[in-house]
Structures are given as C-alpha cells and as structure tokens.
Image (cartoon, rainbow, N blue to C red):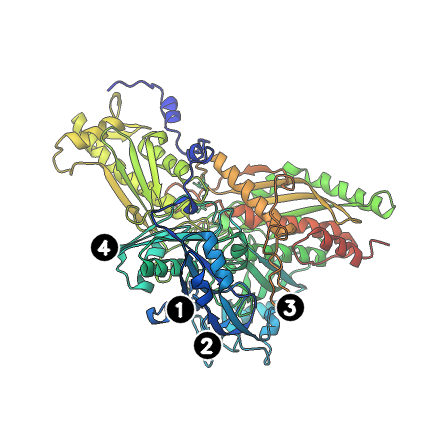
Amino acid sequence: MKDEIQTPADRSANLKGMGCSRKRVEDVRFTQGKGNYVDDIKLDGMLVGDFVRSPYAHARVTAIETEAALKVPGVLAVLTAKDLEPLGLHWMPTLAGDKQMVLADGKVLFQGQEVAFVVATDRYAAADGVAAVEVEYEELPVVTDPFRALDPDAPVLREDLAGQTEGAHGPRRHHNHIFTWEVGDKEATEKVLDEADVVAEEMVYYHRTHPMPLETCGCVASMDKVTGKLTLWGTFQAPHAVRTVASLISGIAEHNIRVISPDIGGGFGNKVGVYPGYICSIVASIVTGKPVKWVESRMDNLMSTAFARDYWMNGRIAATKEGKITGLWCHTTADHGGFDACADPTKFPAGFMNICTGSYDIPVAYLAVDGVYTNKAPGGVAYRCSFRVTEAAYFIERMVEVLAIKLGMDAAELRRINFIREDQFPYQSALGWEYDSGNYHAAWDKALTAVGYDALRQEQAQRIADFKAGKTRKLLGIGLTHFTEIVGAGPVKNCDILGLGMFDSCEIRIHPTGSAIARLGTISQGQGHATTFAQIIASEIGIPADDITLEEGDTDTAPYGLGTYGSRSTPVAGAATAMAARKIRAKAQMIAAYLLEVHDGDVEFDVDRFVVKGAPERFKTMKEIAFASYNQAIPGLEPGLEAVSYYDPPNMTYPFGAYICVMEIDVDTGEHKVRKFYALDDCGTRINPMIIEGQVHGGATEGYAIAMGQEIVYDDMGNHKTATLMDFFVPTSWETPHYTTDHTVTPSPHHPIGAKGVGESPNVGSVPCFSNAVHDAFRPFGLVQSHMPHDQWRIWKIADDLGLHG
Ligand code: CDP
C-alpha cells in the first residue's frame, strides 16, 4: 500500500489524536438543527402524559376526582397511586436507599409533587385534563428549615417510616432524621482543637440550587405488546443503570427492555435519577398499548426533578500561630427534602464530602453529616460535581480564608504553607482518600505570577485608602481558590449505584478498510465524547480520528457502563477505551509480524503502523493490517480485529486547579464587575485542549451563576419562589465574565493515558473563587462570613451591615 504521508510528525498530525484541538464532530449536526433530542421523537399514535402537581408543600390528599378530566376530549386515562398500587409501582426506590412516592399516596411532601398522571392524544388535551382533575387537600404544618425539622415537636413528614429507627445508612434518631455519616478521628481532632494556638469557627452555607440543563427531563415509553419489548428513549445520564432498574421495578425481563439516550441537551447531574415521569410513561404505554411521551416544562424541572447542594457546614479549623493547619472539624446538616433521592454511590450518603480537607496537608480531621427531611423537593444531585465535592471545596476554601483573617495572614501565603507537597504523593488524606498525583505549589506560583498578585494587593491597599478618604465608592476583591477534585468513580470495591459496580466500558471494531466504530457505556450530554474518545483510539492504534465513529447511549448495542456524571467518563471509560485499543494493537502486532515474516517481538508500533525493528522501510500500516485480519487466514488467530474492555479503575483521579478572581464592587448599589478571572486547571494528560477550555468556560459560568445569584428559594409555607427563569438566575453572554485559562500537566500515575477528569473542576473551583472575591473586598471592614448567592441586594446589605453607607 502506498505510504502517502511520509514523516512521523505528518502521520501523527493526520491522526488528530491526543493533544490535538480537534474540532467537535458533533457540532456539524447541532449547528444545523440536526440534533435528535427526546422531544424530537414522534411515533405513530404517540400519546402525551402530564402531571397534576400539588400546590401544597405538606398536605393530606383526601380525594382525587378524575371523572371530569376523563370527559375532556382527547384524554384517555388518568393514573393515580391507587392504579399503580396493584402493580407495586406507587412507590419507587431512590438511589440513596430510600423510597419515593411515584404518585401521591395519601399525602404530599413538597410543592409540585406528582399527584396524578393524565394521558391524552396531545399536550394541549393533557393540559386541559390536568386542569380538570379535582384534588382535595387537607393542609399540614410545613417545615422548610432543616434545623427546625429536628426539633422534638416538629411535624412528622414521613409517616410511612413511623417507628423505623434504622435507615439505609444506619440509625435514625428523630422522625425527620435520615442518617448520620461520620468519617475521621473525632477524639483526636477535638483534642487538637482544644490545644491549638488558633481556632477559627464558622457556619458555611452552600445554598440550594438546581442544575437546570437547557433541555428538561423527559422520555418516550413504547411497549410492543406483540413482542413484549419495551423501548424507552429518555434523557438518561446512565442508560444501562436505567434499564436494570426498570427491569427490577417492573418485572420485565432485562433483555426485553431497550433504553436509548438520544442527544441530550445538558445533564449536570439532573438526569441521573429516576423520576415519576419515567414510571408513569411506562405504565401508561402498557395500559394504552401506545407510545407515551412525557417531557417536563421548565417549571416542572425547577420544582420537582432534583436540586443540588443545600448543605449547612459548621466548621472549625485549628492552626499554629505561624499558620500551619493542625486539624479540621466539620458538622454538616444536609437538607434532603421530602425523600432521600441523593445520587451518590451507596456507601457514601454524603457523596465525597470527605474530600473537604482539600489541597492541604491536615494531620487530623473529622466529618459528620446529618441528613434531614424537610418539605422541599427531593434530589441532592451532583450538579456538575463529583458527589458533594463542590460543597467540600467551598467549605475548605472558606475556612482557609476565615483562618487567614483570624491569623492576620495573607490567604495566598497561608495556602502555600499548607499545601500537600509534590513529594508527599500518593498522599493519604486524614479522611480516607489516596490522592494520586499533584504539584500544587507549581500551579499556585504560576497562577499568582500570571495575575500579578503582589501588584494586585498593592492596588487593593491603595483602593482601601482612597475609599476611606472618600475618593472612591468602589472596593476591590481578590478571590483565591486552590481546589482538589476527586473524580472517576470508581473502584468497584468502593463505589456502586444500587448495587451496580461503577466500572465502565468500551468496545472497538476495526472495519476491513481500516476505519472503525467504538461504543462506550457512557453518554455525552454536550461534552464532546464523539470527538475526544476517537482521539484516544487514534493515538493508541494509529487510525485517524476522522475515520472512527463513536456511539453511546443504546443499551442494545453499547457495552454495559455506569454512565456519565461526576467527570467519570475520561477517568473510567477513557481508560477502558485505551485498554480496548491496546488489545487491538496487540493483535495487530501479531498480524503485522506474520505479514512481514518476522517474530512478534521484532516489530514495533510507530504512529500508524508496525515497523520491523532496525528496518523502518519494512512496515505494515494499520490499514493493511485491518484488511489482512479479514482477508487472510493467519495461523493461531481468529479473523477480525475488535476488542472490548470493562475497566475497573484502581483509584479515583484527583484533578486540581488554581483560580483567581479580581472583582470590583460598588458599595452603594451592590453591583459587581468581574475584572479578571484566571483559571489554571491540571487534569493530567490533556486529550483535547479546545474541549477542555470549553468545559472550563461552561463550568465557570455555572459557578458564577451559583455564587452570584442562582438559588432555589422556598417561603415558610413551602412555596417555591424561583420556578421560572424570571427568578432563577442563568447568566447570558451579557453577565458572563471573560475567562483566562491556563494549565499545568501532572498525569495520573494509574490511568492508562494519565488523564484525569475536567468537566466538573471549573464549577467546583469557581464558586469559592467568586465568593472569596466578594468576601475579600469587605475583609478590611470586618466581614468574616456571608452566605451565597452574592446577588446585588445581598452585597448591598453586607455594605450596609458594615456601616459603609454612612
Ligand atoms: O464525564 P464527563 O464527560 O462529564 O467529564 P470528563 O471526563 O471530565 O470529560 C469532559 C470532556 O473533556 C470530554 O470530552 C473529555 O474527553 C475531555 N477531556 C480531555 O480532553 N482531557 C482530559 N484530561 C479530561 C477530559
């Protein structure tokens, strides 16, 4: 075969492999309106389902009258809990070991809870049917405050759990208590705190928010009564897990269920859980014999399918007077709403909150988390973070700032003297993790130099002087953050979802002409997997990425995997991809040796071919090898060239980053302006720098929203006050700051290509960075801690409380 591209560098560039900013192949479809989302699916005779939802946060449901609704033209059925009960489907298991009502069974526990499911010929008839269902409620006292929920006289929310003193995660000590999770050495930590030179204590609240993907949750269920096969299209971040759970709940044999995640318009954790809409659509399709579609409205999405954060983290941090941190203590009260539907690995009821020692070498630590029921929506999903890592990062990055205030130290220097040193990796944290690799000092120094940290502090000092002299009304805040993420759940021995070990997979088939198809157990929701995973294969086996089709999301064709969330795709499925490619390369080596009539060990891989060692003019390209695998009988080898890998990672990966924000704050109006946002990320080996930059921009913008205005708010009666985009802040290009991105590269020692995840990092790192900038601006005037989100009113209020309005 003619070798048209001569130099190894040219041949390598032709592959568009790892390290190349290959353009996103998905965007050809997306930018031309050719995406195929759940709501684009139209099937013959398809019906539409919609929910009657509770206007009350806590009430007894005394009657549901469906007759009028059934008379609405186009309405075919109205399902209530009574209809689901004989099937055992009126309640469903949650990912957290609790159970949740599919439809209100005697009472409701949050505003917007699903009460009845109306099935009609189109969405308009369904909406009319919903309006015609009459429900009688008897209001009950409401609890929206997790601390009040634990008072002895607090109303009993979960009557179904009456008398149950054991929950899924150990003893329950109160009728609204879910679990207590403890990690670390309590006694040793308290001793250190008692004897420390300096102890800083603070309540750090990370408010309730919502992932709010542009596309809401939805599905189409289609039961074929002839073949007995159920096909379920849906916005699923973990399609295989959905298939298994659907089989276990419904009793339909798993081989008779096909789950397909088509294009997904953002997930951010919102599409991991199982929601009542999925169950009701399946039942409705079985009952009517027709396909049934359910797609949430924006309000439904913000009110009912999940929430994120809502952690009250009470912390104490001990240090010597020189600033060496000696211990960390944290007690968290976690508001889980009406049902515990957190999406966490089974053994981690508070996710990976125990990464809250952050980037610092802290000898002893103790963490306790109490989960509590309130009259709010269930969820507790990992909104672009690896199971509560963002809460942990916010907590430690605020505690370090609070300690710096107490010590009268520069917060950058305090961080520097407490970082885990490069020579301490792999590092065993006080709360049980083994950090794989890092060079925090190098990243920190690079970041401080890049922003001109010393000059910024001088400018800030001048600004304070000018402010005090009445020359300006604007303050300058310098927000610092050094975060450590933990991503890539996870070793099967530690991490499972509903008993399913958290491995992942990749299957690669090389076609005779040298192109390929790869299928993975993950599913992209916008991250660009079709672009980047092809790049891994390209580099590993020497086939151009442009010649590789990548498929995800169809359980009938893709190998089993646990899906995409928590930045696990690259650490787990990315590793599986490299391992499957290496199996192919090993077989290709044998084929090449046979074709070149030498021993296997006498050929070596060279970009896109195997060459005879010492005789580079004698080679076989991967294209030639692929063809030979289908066309020649090679002794001792099966025909074809394909491989599958199921990868169980030995450890998580620990990406990290140094973020710095410079913010101007108008004391009189509470307005802010982000003057600079510098984000240095280290995600180990970088597969596609352009995609990484995009991930950082997106994640940092979500972080900006969370820190500066985005919030799910309830009033005392449990009314949801932020269920539209008029009230729930989503930044447009107008508000979004400009970002400067940077990187260092510290490969993961245990990942086959040294890559760590990156998707979550900017959300995790940017929230404390923006928040610290606000705090830093007011630090000289006595501000120690103030709750997010720092919207205009709250910033104005800080200034007012500090007496800065005269
Ligand atoms: O699990 P998820 O895809 O959300 O997160 P991820 O594994 O951090 O990957 C997000 C995107 O960034 C994917 O397209 C990855 O292939 C890409 N990435 C990369 O190019 N290099 C890395 N070291 C990590 C991720």
**Residue type pointed to by label 4:** Val
The residue identified by callout 1 is: 90
**Residue type pointed to by label 1:** His
Tell me if mark 1 has few (under 14), some (14-19) or many (20+) residues whose alpha carbon lies within 10 angstroms of its own.
Answer: many
For residue 381, say whether it is visible: no
Mark 1 or 4 closer to N-term? 1
Mark 2 or 1 closer to N-term? 1
Position of 781 with respect to 357 (left or right) is right
Image point 59% across, 80% down: which residue?
152
Q: CA distance from mark 4 to mark 3?
A: 52 Å
For residue 401, say whether it is visible: yes
The residue identified by callout 2 is: 161
Q: Nearer the viewer, residue 147 or 405?
A: 147
Tell me if mark 2 has few (under 14), some (14-19) or many (20+) residues whose alpha carbon lies within 10 angstroms of its own.
Answer: few
Label 3 near label 2: C-beta < 8 Å?
A: no
Mark 4 or 3 closer to N-term? 4
Label 1 near label 2: C-beta < 8 Å?
A: no
The residue identified by callout 3 is: 716
The residue identified by callout 4 is: 226
Mark 3 or 1 closer to N-term? 1
